[in-house]
Amino acid sequence: MLEIDCPFCGKRPEAEFWCIGEGTASIPSLDASADDLQKYLYFRTNSGGEISERWVHRHGCGEWLTVRRNTKTNAILSVTFMNDDANTRGQREDR
Ligand SMILES: [Zn+2]
């Protein structure tokens, strides 16, 4: 089982997270063609080696994360908040 180091909660078991999918796919615009939507929804690169994935800490802080992982070794290379204002999120006092 993977252990993911959530920037807000610390190291937690994979079971607390949900993998949304590859983090490299860009979200199509609202006026995108049916072909572009189909590619976004159903086609993944599924490449071996280092990839970027989107995860959500569903049984923890609820934050959306970008996880860099090597699919061949399953080693997690980095975990960051998905949004750019990530560095201020860990300092919120309302949690
Ligand atoms: Zn968390």
Image: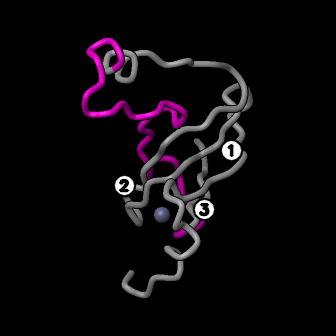
Residue 88 placement (x, y as % from top left): 53, 76
Q: Residue 69 is drawn in which quadrant?
A: top right
Residue at image x 36%, y 55%?
58
Between residue 11 and residue 80, name the one nearer to us: 80
Quadrant including the C terminus:
bottom left
Q: Secondary structure at mark 2?
A: loop
Residue 76: give its label: 1
Tell me which residue sits at (45%, 82%) in the image. Answer: 92
User: Which labelled disc corresponds to residue 11?
Assistant: 3
Nearer-N-terminus badge (1/2): 2
Q: Is residue 44 above or below residue 83?
A: above
Q: Residue at x 59, y 46 (%)?
A: 67
In the displayed orientation, state which residue is furthest to the bottom.
93
Please name the amino acid that badge 1 sits on: Ile
Between the residue at mark 1 and the residue at mark 3, the CA separation in whole angstroms equals: 12 Å
Is-magenta flag for residue 7?
A: no
On residue 58, which mark appears? 2
Rendered residue at 36%/30% (across/down): 28
Which colour assignment does the render follow?
Answer: one colour
Quick check: 79 above or below 72? below
Of the residues shown, which amino acid type is indicated by label 3? Lys
Q: Earlier in the sequence, mark 2 or mark 3?
A: 3
Could you tell me if the residues under marks 1 and 3 are in contact, i.e. CB atoms within 8 Å? no
How far is the residue under mark 1 from the one under mark 2?
19 Å
- Which label belongs to residue 26? none
Where are the magenta residues, as a range?
Answer: 8-36
Q: Quadrant of residue 1?
A: top right
Circle 3 Cα neighbour tier, 10 Å, few/some/many (<14 / 14–19 / ≥20):
few
